[in-house]
Image: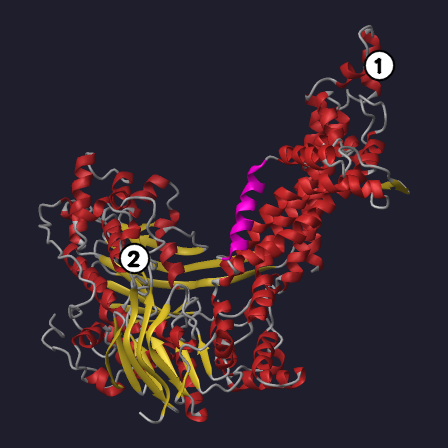
């Protein structure tokens, strides 16, 4: 390619370790032309970010370039000394990082950071640099740039900070921009704005951009060409429509089939091959097994035997901050008179952006937070009125929660057996320790980890496997109601597909009722029967899932649905599995 | 800012009142002061009269109130042992301790912070390894041993430096200073080093750990990716971020240098408060102990206040509560 702006040829990146070199990138060939956006997609550990760091010569020690060459406009830039490389970083190649909350120095004003960068690369006076800083902020769409320039990073919202980061990357008019997961930490509506901004920059300035991401939606939205990475290798490169619509490589196929489809509801996710192989699940005969016993939960309390399992009415939660000895307290209405019902056996979704109060509702229902007002009736009993811990525990046993972060939600110092047995022991659900062990082993089999996992510690498992541990723990009390708070948002798409399939299977087998909280609309569409849309603490719409996606009524729901990535021309899948139910 | 400082002041006053209560408790619960003041042959009536005149028959709250009121004016009563007002004793000793502490704190900071930065920036260099090994020795060697070794070497063998006391002092009002005479300065060297070594090693390790942490953050990586010079990144961005948590610990350390210079003061017979306190403990001289307790609490409260204000200056996130 003669027009290539940045050309990476046969790049090899190695991380020497005691057990031999770990090769993070193997013979990677990539190129990007002026005015073009190249998407690099792959799952965690595929070596995507390594490539960006190798281009910038910022590999973390002991990583090193083991072979290959990198050219910028035909000029070789790999293997340059650090002082020479510094003239390229920021000036000719700009970089945008993932998390806008951590990529700005918290102790300096935006002006100081911009001016410092500008004056490093361009020969400008303080005043000229400041004027340039203000105009850069204006170009990335920050309102009142001449005022905002003197603010500190913490005074900006996440999306605005990412704009500041982009402004910093643009300081010296670079020819190439490397964006490493530029929108992963942002809400969908902010993500759409940032992607638009990046697209405009590429078109107007004619820079070449490499977007590194795990998100197929982002790729579909902005990339002209896509490179798919798998275990350090680029398995396939091509125009976006070709890769998404008719991929050649089997990995790409399975990766795309694992992406939750926004357009139609499938019964299950097609099983993803060639990625992390989950152990085979062993089916249990629930009519005889412990897990299936006592599932009748006795007759419904009260008369409304056909009423909803969970009825939430006018729920309110207010967080106060500050306020000590007469100083002014500020309060945040996190949940504002929210009412909804969840019927026995259904999966009720709650969707909304960060800060909309989704997780707060989960915590109120489980009793982690105490509601300021309103009622939560579970199986006909108002939980907010129960004073006695013992009474409450009886109901709590029937509802369990699965958290978002698989790394911090299991106790790292306990063996998996004890983690799962803890709720059984606490609620005294088994007759003997031997029985508890047998139950734990069966549970582990049931969630596809295998009984051998019982003697290991959580750090020996990957994120997806840990989430299975969380699920086994939640099932250990024989619950009838499961609350999943973003159970898959920390996981790769293929693992997400596995976990969501597992949850679906369990729901069917055990007749579980679920409250499924997510910010991810396609996931909601695949999982839920009915959905409630949250915005700023209010539930703005409750509808049947399909009805919501086809014809949203509320303005906010419409807005949210319109932001969903569209994936035009997405690969036709084996439709045999679609709509099978 | 004003609100913040006034809040902190209020909290400080509460802390002082609580410490005052404990100090006051010493009088009531650690022995009978009358017993300490009278001789063997005092009659019961005389004891009664003395108890009454000292106000020891009044209710607890009244006595506490009186104690606090007097303490605020700097009146801590008479020392049982020396028969002098406690405030005079302290005023006499305080400058010695403060001068020693400040010099050693200054030494510790002046050497410790740069060494911490160096070891963080060049973790693999020979110097860094040397510093780290030395700092381990500094942490593990007891203060008195370092002091005795210094005395043995520089005082006894080489006879370069005096082995005890403060040397000649200059009176500046009620403040006696050793800074202005040759013998005063010479006397200061060894105790100051002894006291500084432990603090310095602590600061080296603290600054190093904190700086390594900061160097791993995204904003440092981003700064490198923008092509900023390493000097700017290391000293302007990284160092400032490092200092935010380090300030707290250093503040507390300065407090503890002042409060717990006791061992060093005993080794060098330094006429400071530590020595006064040790003697007071061995003789159950409660007024001196109570006054010392209050003074140390006051020092800590003042240092914490300064630390809080420094935080405010360094970290903009505290300035604007958005």
Q: Are marks 2 and 1 on the same chain?
A: no
Q: Is residue A402 visible?
A: yes
In the rendered view, would you say A37 is above or below B214?
below
Quadrant that contains the C terminus of chain A: bottom left
Colour scheme: secondary structure
Is B38 on the left or on the right of A88, as rendered? right
Quadrant that contains the N terminus of chain A: bottom left
Q: Report crowding for label 2: few under 14, some 14 to 19, many 20 or more residues within 10 A (C-alpha).
A: many
Determine contact: label 2, label 1, CB under 8 Å: no
* Residue A242 x/y as whole percent: 22, 87
* Residue A483, disc: 2
* Residue A425 x/y as whole percent: 26, 39
The answer to if A529 sits in the magenta stretch is no
* Residue A163 x/y as whole percent: 49, 78
Q: Report crowding for label 1: few under 14, some 14 to 19, many 20 or more residues within 10 A (C-alpha).
A: few
* Secondary structure mainly formed by the magenta segment: helix
Q: Residue furthest front?
A: B158
The answer to which of B12 and A371 lies nearer the viewer is B12
- Give the quarter of the image for residue A515: bottom left
Per the image, the residue denoted by label 1 is: B49
Is A43 on the left or on the right of B114, as rendered? left
* Residue B61, disc: none
Is B98 on the left or on the right of A450, as rendered? right
Chain letter belonging to callout 1? B
In the rendered view, would you say A382 is above or below B140?
below
Chain letter belonging to callout 2? A
| Start-end of magenta stretch | B125-141
Q: Is residue A296 visible?
A: no
The answer to which of A576 and A532 lies nearer the viewer is A576
Which residue is located at x 14 percent, y 48 percent?
Answer: A292
């Amino acid at each position: 390619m003669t027009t290539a702006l940045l050309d990476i040829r046969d790049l090899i990146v190695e991380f020497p370790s005691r057990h031999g070199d770990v090769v993070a990138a193997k013979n990677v060939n990539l190129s990007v032309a002026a005015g073009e956006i190249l998407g690099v997609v792959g799952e965690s550990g595929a070596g995507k970010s390594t490539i960006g760091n190798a281009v910038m010569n910022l590999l973390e020690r002991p990583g090193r370039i083991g072979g290959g060459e990198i050219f910028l406009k035909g000029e070789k830039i790999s293997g340059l000394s650090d002082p020479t490389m510094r003239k390229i970083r920021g000036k000719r190649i700009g970089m945008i990082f993932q998390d806008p909350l951590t990529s700005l120095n918290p102790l300096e004003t935006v002006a100081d950071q911009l001016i410092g960068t500008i004056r490093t690369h361009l020969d400008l006076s303080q005043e000229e640099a400041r004027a340039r800083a203000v105009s850069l902020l204006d170009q990335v769409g920050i309102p009142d740039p001449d005022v905002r320039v003197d603010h500190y990073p913490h005074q900006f919202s996440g999306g605005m900070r990412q704009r500041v980061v982009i402004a910093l990357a643009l300081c010296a008019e670079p020819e190439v921009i490397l964006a490493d997961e530029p929108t992963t930490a942002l809400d969908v509506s902010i993500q759409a704005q940032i992607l638009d901004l990046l697209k405009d920059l590429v078109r107007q300035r004619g820079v070449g951009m490499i977007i590194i991401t795990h998100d197929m939606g982002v790729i579909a939205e902005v990339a002209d060409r896509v490179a798919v990475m798998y275990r350090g290798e680029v398995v396939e490169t091509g125009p976006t429509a070709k890769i998404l619509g008719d991929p050649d490589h089997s990995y790409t196929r399975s990766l795309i089939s694992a992406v939750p489809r926004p357009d139609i509801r499938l019964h299950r996710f097609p099983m993803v091959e060639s990625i992390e192989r989950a152990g085979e699940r062993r089916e249990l005969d629930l009519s005889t097994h412990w897990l299936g016993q006592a599932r009748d939960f006795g007759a419904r309390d009260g008369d409304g035997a056909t009423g909803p399992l969970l009825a939430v009415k006018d729920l309110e939660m207010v967080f106060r901050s500050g306020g000590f000895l007469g100083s002014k307290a500020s309060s945040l209405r996190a949940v504002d008179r929210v009412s909804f019902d969840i019927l026995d056996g259904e999966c009720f979704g709650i969707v909304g952006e960060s800060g909309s109060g989704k997780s707060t509702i989960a915590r109120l229902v489980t009793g982690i937070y105490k509601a300021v007002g309103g009622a939560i009736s579970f199986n006909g009993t108002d939980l907010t009125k129960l004073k006695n811990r013992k009474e409450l525990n009886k109901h709590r046993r029937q509802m369990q929660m699965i958290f978002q972060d698989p790394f911090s939600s299991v106790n790292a110092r306990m063996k998996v057996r004890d983690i799962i047995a803890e709720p059984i022991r606490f609620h005294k659900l088994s007759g003997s320790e031997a029985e508890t062990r047998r139950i734990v082993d069966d549970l582990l089999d049931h969630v596809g980890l295998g009984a051998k996992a019982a003697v290991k510690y959580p750090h020996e498992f990957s994120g997806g496997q840990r989430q299975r541990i969380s699920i086994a723990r939640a099932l250990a009390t024989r619950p009838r109601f499961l609350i999943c708070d973003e159970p898959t948002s920390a996981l790769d798409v293929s693992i997400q597909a596995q976990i969501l399939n597992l949850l679906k299977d369990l729901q069917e087998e055990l007749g579980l009722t679920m409250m499924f909280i997510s910010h991810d609309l396609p996931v909601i569409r695949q999982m839920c029967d009915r959905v409630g849309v949250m915005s700023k603490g209010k539930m703005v719409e409750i509808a049947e899932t399909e009805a919501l996606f086809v014809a949203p009524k509320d303005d906010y729901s419409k807005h949210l649905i319109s932001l969903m990535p569209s994936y035009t021309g997405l690969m036709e899948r084996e439709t045999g599995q679609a709509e099978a139910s | 800012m004003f609100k913040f400082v006034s809040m902190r002041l209020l909290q400080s006053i509460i802390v002082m009142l609580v410490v005052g209560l404990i100090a006051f408790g010493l009088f009531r619960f650690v022995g009978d002061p009358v017993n300490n003041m009278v001789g063997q042959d005092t009659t019961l009536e005389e004891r009664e009269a003395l108890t009454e005149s000292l106000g020891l028959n009044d209710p607890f709250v009244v006595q506490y109130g009186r104690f606090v009121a007097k303490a605020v004016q700097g009146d801590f009563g008479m020392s049982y042992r020396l028969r002098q007002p406690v405030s005079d004793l302290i005023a006499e000793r305080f400058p010695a301790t403060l001068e020693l502490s400040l010099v050693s704190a200054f030494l510790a900071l002046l050497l410790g912070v740069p060494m911490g930065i160096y070891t963080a920036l060049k973790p693999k260099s020979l110097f860094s390894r040397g510093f780290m090994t030395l700092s381990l020795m500094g942490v593990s060697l007891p203060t008195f041993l370092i002091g005795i070794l210094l005395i043995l070497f520089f005082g006894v063998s080489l006879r370069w430096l005096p082995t005890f006391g403060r040397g000649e002092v200059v009176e500046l009002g009620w403040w006696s200073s050793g800074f202005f005479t040759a013998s005063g300065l010479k006397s200061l060297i060894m105790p100051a080093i002894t006291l500084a070594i432990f603090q310095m090693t602590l600061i080296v390790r603290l600054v190093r750990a904190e700086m390594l942490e900061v160097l791993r953050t995204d904003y440092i990586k981003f700064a490198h990716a923008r092509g900023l010079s390493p000097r700017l990144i290391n000293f302007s961005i990284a160092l400032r971020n490092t200092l935010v948590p380090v300030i707290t610990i250093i503040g507390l350390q300065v407090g503890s240098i002042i409060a717990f210079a006791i061992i060093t003061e005993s080794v060098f017979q330094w006429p400071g408060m530590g020595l006064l306190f040790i003697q007071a403990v061995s003789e159950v001289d409660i007024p001196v102990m109570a006054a010392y307790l209050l003074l140390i609490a006051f020092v800590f409260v003042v240092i914490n206040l300064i630390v809080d204000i420094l935080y405010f200056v360094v970290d903009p996130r505290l300035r604007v509560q958005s």
